[in-house]
Image (spheres, coloured by chain):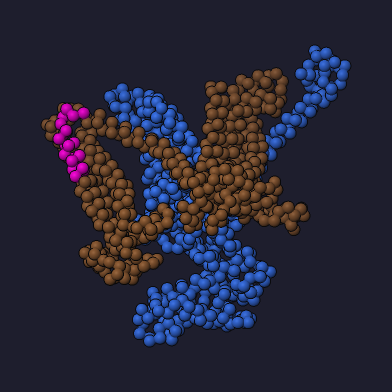
């Protein structure tokens, strides 16, 4: 029985359980709801949950464990001399799965009978041709051990599936009977159901922790793999980034760091003054009408997806900068040779960060107590003097926090740099040259058909780990500053 | 500061010494301070203006570059479906008709175009007669073949086809291709453009709204005129279904727990810290997570909208949780107290009273979270939703979730990377569609908030 059908049966049992639990409770109260401890629907819900929760939990666990178990059993059929490392083994295993799936298809299409499929051997039958005839294309002829492993795989997963269906349905049925036997008018159904609901709520809340754990584990495992293949000193202190999939790559992170840092710096140089002055103007000077128009308009910039900014950098800002600073440009400077450059990406990223800085600083400036402004104005200071000498110093920690948050956003930004910054890893001071960043290299190392076991692909996880750690530290620090500051005036 | 009682020695320079100044007459220093004030104010206005100018520039660039993608040049060509070529035996056997490949249709197109030219009195000035077919998209032969296979009874007749003009011709009428740029182009000559101009003048060639761009599938690198965003729109749609089905219940459950039930303990603190940090993790890191956990470990299919949806769910969860908690917080405690007072349990007071009242806020937050997920690109690159041609719409719901597909932002990225500038126009056009979706989602969110917002 396929998982879908098992699931449908369990759901049907749960529905029956709801009706039966409710009816049984009402009967035990002899039809008078006042004799019951809880509302009748709670007795129904209790029966329903008793069916669903254990059965589904078992099914999920089984679905995860069974393939792992079969995998280890089947691997025993593959002679160790036929593969060099774990990467080659996983390729063979995927062959095995393909052949096994192909046999299933062939049986369904009637090319083989069930017994045929289990007893085939590669000498007597051309498996590749037979599977090709039912639309399963294989890359090469089937090795005897692969066929044997595939047959074992099929047999095991067939047994596993039957066992799973039986176990899950039996558990569901047991849950139904158990809950119905417990149902009588003194049974505290509401308390039980509410406790179960609370457990579900806690589980949902724990997903956030699981996600972080997933991120950390997936980064750490692969990073450790990477450092087994490539020395960490060269990764962190190497000055060249030259991956070559043939081997002998130089994977130093420093040029990428420099590109990331340079682009973020330009972005912040654009965004901080504009964002800060916009925030000051909007919170201290602007009339409600101007504020009501300009603030949401600036925030539109924050809602635009980054791919749009990326395209804007690649196709509009880049060519415009070349027209200004390029060889035949208006300024005649010949500083820039291509549209993708640190300047392009930095400028556009700066535009993206303006609303980020302006709305955060706006909140912070607004939370400076009015009495401080009144005091300063009362002493005869002009508005700008009040802002410069009273409001900004008071808001400074918060603004620094906002800038740090923006910096972490800039470091982690991907699409703008992938499209706008170029692909060459360089250590150079010229902002009109193409450079690349950590995020852009993560994308380029992990897209395409790279072998996941090679250092050239695994380096992306080490890059991701570095990025994660840096942005996390920046965020925690920034949030700490902002929170500390907020408490001051509350 | 410029007070009369200040001894004249300490009067700052600029004020005429020895004479007491008045608040009513502006002395030099006050004038300087006022000028500084005005300057400061101008900086502020300037900053806001620069921000707004950037926004305007961005929108103008999008609309100006993307607008042309919505129209396409078509040529109406009378094509004689010659029996001798398409069905040699003449018995209209479908299998035999299908044996004629698209290559066999090419002469028909050339003949049809020649007929069109003579009918309109235009000279074929090309050196090679066959080159005239370059006016037409390479997809045309496929279109004619499909028509013939669908209507075998029309073989032998002359049928009028509305064929896509090739992307160079289309670009010429949109101002992207000029006669100078064709000098280095092997795909089309200036002579073709003369013919196209003449056809345009006589009405055989026209520019019309291009539904295929909105509804159609992606095309191969050499046929930008045929590419559409429809299939990747479906991919995005299925991803959003996954996000909605997972992120909304999980997000709401998490917020209810944290806001209404959670005791102050280590575990709760840990969850809180995690949520606020996840909100700030770069989106590319979620892509790495998706690659390592869903594809490498769980062995889910690559490029599937299901995986994309899972990754985006994890990414949107913090947004939804934060907004849901805010709207739960906004429900006044008196509601809870009243429910508890008439004998409801804590759980009942939350699910029967607090949650319905917080629902508009939750929905608003969810829509905004979905809009964010819809525009996100970086994680999709890592789970393989780029790098191929999303040419077939999914057939059925299961295939919609599991078969490789693209998503709108990934498709835009894919187009932006292709070499032919005709694809840039498509990329901008795709952005217009994407932004229209985002805009309508945000407007719905605002309307929801306006309609249901309650002031307590």
Residues drawn in magenta: A170-188
Residue, x 59% and y 38% (percent of image)?
A407
Horizontal relation, residue B342 to residue A169: left or right: right
The number of callouts visible is: 0
Report the quarter where the N terminus of chain B lies. top right
Horizontal relation, residue A465 to residue B202: left or right: left
Residue A388 x %, y %: 68, 27
Q: Quadrant of residue B313?
A: top left
Residue A104 x %, y %: 28, 62
Residue B150 x %, y %: 39, 74
Residue B52 x %, y %: 63, 43
Farthest residue in the front direction? A81
Q: From where the camera sits, is residue A35 visible?
A: yes
Farthest residue in the right direction? B18
Q: Is residue A171 magenta?
A: yes
Q: From where the camera sits, is residue B371 visible?
A: no
Q: Is residue A443 positioned above or below A135 on the image?
A: above
- Chain that is brown in the image: A
Residue, x 65% and y 50% (percent of image)?
A426
Q: Nearest the camera: B142 or A473?
A: A473
Residue, x 17% and y 27% (percent of image)?
A186
Q: Nearest the camera: A271 or A203?
A: A203
Q: Is residue B2 magenta?
A: no
Q: Is residue B17 positioned above or below A105 on the image?
A: above
Report the quarter where the C terminus of chain B lies. top left
Residue, x 80% and y 25% (percent of image)?
B29
Horizontal relation, residue A18 to residue B80: left or right: left
- Chain that is blue in the image: B
**Dominant secondary structure of the magenta stretch?**
helix
Q: Nearest the camera: B378 or A43?
A: B378
């Amino acid at each position: 029985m396929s998982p879908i059908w098992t699931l449908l049966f369990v759901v049907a049992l749960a529905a029956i359980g709801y009706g039966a639990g409710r009816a049984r409770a009402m009967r035990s109260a002899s039809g008078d709801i006042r004799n019951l401890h809880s509302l009748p629907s709670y007795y129904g819900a209790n029966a329903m949950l008793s069916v669903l929760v254990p059965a589904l939990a078992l099914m999920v666990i089984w679905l995860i464990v069974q393939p792992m178990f079969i995998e280890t059993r089947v691997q025993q059929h593959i002679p160790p001399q036929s593969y060099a490392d774990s990467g080659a083994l996983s390729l063979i295993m995927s062959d095995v799965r393909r052949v096994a799936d192909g046999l299933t298809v062939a049986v369904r299409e009637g090319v083989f009978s069930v017994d045929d499929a289990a007893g085939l051997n590669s000498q007597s039958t051309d498996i590749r041709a037979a599977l090709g005839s039912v639309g399963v294309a294989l890359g090469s002829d089937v090795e005897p051990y692969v066929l044997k492993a595939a047959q074992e795989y099929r047999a095991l997963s067939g047994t596993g599936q039957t066992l799973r269906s039986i176990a899950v349905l039996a558990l569901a049925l047991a849950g139904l009977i158990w809950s119905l036997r417990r149902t009588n008018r003194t049974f505290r159904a509401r308390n039980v159901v509410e406790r179960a609901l609370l457990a579900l709520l806690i589980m949902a809340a724990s997903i956030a922790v699981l996600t972080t754990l997933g991120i950390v584990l997936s980064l750490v495992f692969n990073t450790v793999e990477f450092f087994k293949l490539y020395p960490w000193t060269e990764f962190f202190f190497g000055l060249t980034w030259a991956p070559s999939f043939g081997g002998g790559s130089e994977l130093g992170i420093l040029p990428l760091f420099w590109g990331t840092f340079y682009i973020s710096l330009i972005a912040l140089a654009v965004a901080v003054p504009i964002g800060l002055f916009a925030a000051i103007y909007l919170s201290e000077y602007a009339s409600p009408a101007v504020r009501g128009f300009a603030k949401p308009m600036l925030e539109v910039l924050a809602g635009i997806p980054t791919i749009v900014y990326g395209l804007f950098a690649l196709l509009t800002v880049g060519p415009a900068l070349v027209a200004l600073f390029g060889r035949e440009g208006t300024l005649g400077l010949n500083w820039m040779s291509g549209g993708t450059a640190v300047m392009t990406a930095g400028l556009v990223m700066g535009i993206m960060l303006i609303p980020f800085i302006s709305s955060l600083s706006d909140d912070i400036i607004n939370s400076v107590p009015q009495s401080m402004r009144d005091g300063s104005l009362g002493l005869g200071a002009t508005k700008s003097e009040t802002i410069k000498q009273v409001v900004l110093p008071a808001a400074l920690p918060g603004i620094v926090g906002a800038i740090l948050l923006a910096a972490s956003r800039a470091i982690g930004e991907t699409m703008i740099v992938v499209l706008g910054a170029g692909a060459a890893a360089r250590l150079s001071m010229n902002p009109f040259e193409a450079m690349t960043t950590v995020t852009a290299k993560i994308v380029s190392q992990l897209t395409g058909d790279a072998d996941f076991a090679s250092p050239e692909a695994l380096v992306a996880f080490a890059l991701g780990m570095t990025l994660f750690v840096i942005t996390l530290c920046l965020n925690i620090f920034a949030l700490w500053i902002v929170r500390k500051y907020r408490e001051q005036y509350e | 500061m410029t007070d009369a009682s200040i001894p004249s020695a300490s009067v700052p320079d600029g004020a005429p010494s020895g004479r007491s100044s008045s608040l009513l007459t502006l002395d030099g220093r006050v004038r300087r301070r006022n000028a500084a004030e005005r300057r400061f104010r101008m900086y502020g206005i300037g900053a806001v203006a620069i921000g707004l100018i950037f926004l305007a520039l961005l929108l103008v660039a999008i609309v100006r570059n993307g607008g042309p993608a919505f129209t396409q040049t078509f040529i109406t060509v009378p094509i004689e479906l010659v029996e001798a070529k398409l069905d040699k035996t003449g018995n209209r056997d479908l299998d035999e008709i299908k044996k004629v490949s698209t290559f066999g249709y090419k002469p028909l197109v050339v003949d049809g175009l020649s007929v069109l030219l003579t009918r309109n009195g235009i000279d074929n000035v090309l050196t090679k007669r066959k080159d005239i077919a370059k006016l037409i998209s390479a997809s045309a032969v496929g279109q004619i073949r499909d028509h013939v296979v669908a209507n075998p009874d029309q073989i032998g007749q002359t049928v009028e086809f509305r064929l896509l003009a090739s992307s160079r011709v289309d670009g010429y009428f949109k101002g992207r291709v000029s006669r100078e740029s064709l000098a280095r182009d092997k795909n089309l000559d200036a002579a073709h453009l003369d013919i196209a101009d003449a056809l345009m003048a006589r009405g055989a060639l026209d520019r019309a709204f291009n539904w295929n761009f909105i509804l159609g599938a992606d095309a191969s690198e050499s046929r930008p005129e045929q590419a559409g965003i429809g299939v990747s729109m479906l991919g995005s749609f299925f991803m959003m279904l996954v996000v909605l089905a997972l992120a909304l219940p999980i997000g709401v459950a998490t917020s209810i727990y944290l806001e209404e039930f959670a005791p102050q303990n280590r575990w709760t603190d840990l969850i809180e810290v995690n949520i606020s940090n996840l909100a700030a993790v770069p989106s590319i890191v979620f892509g790495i997570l998706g690659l390592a956990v869903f594809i490498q470990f769980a062995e889910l299919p690559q490029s599937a909208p299901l995986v994309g949806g899972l990754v985006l769910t994890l990414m949107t969860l913090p947004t939804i949780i934060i907004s849901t908690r805010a709207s739960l917080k906004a429900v006044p405690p008196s509601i809870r107290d009243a429910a508890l007072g008439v004998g409801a349990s804590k759980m009942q007071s939350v699910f029967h009273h607090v949650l319905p009242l917080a629902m508009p806020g939750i929905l608003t937050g969810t829509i905004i979270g979905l809009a964010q997920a819809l525009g996100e690109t970086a994680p999709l690159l890592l789970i393989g939703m780029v790098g191929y041609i999303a040419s077939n719409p999914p057939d059925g719901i299961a295939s919609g979730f599991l078969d490789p597909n693209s998503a709108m932002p990934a498709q835009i990225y894919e187009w932006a990377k292709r070499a032919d500038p005709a694809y840039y126009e498509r990329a901008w056009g795709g952005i217009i569609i994407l932004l229209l979706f985002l805009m309508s989602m945000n407007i719905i969110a605002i309307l929801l908030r306006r309609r249901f917002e309650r002031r307590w």
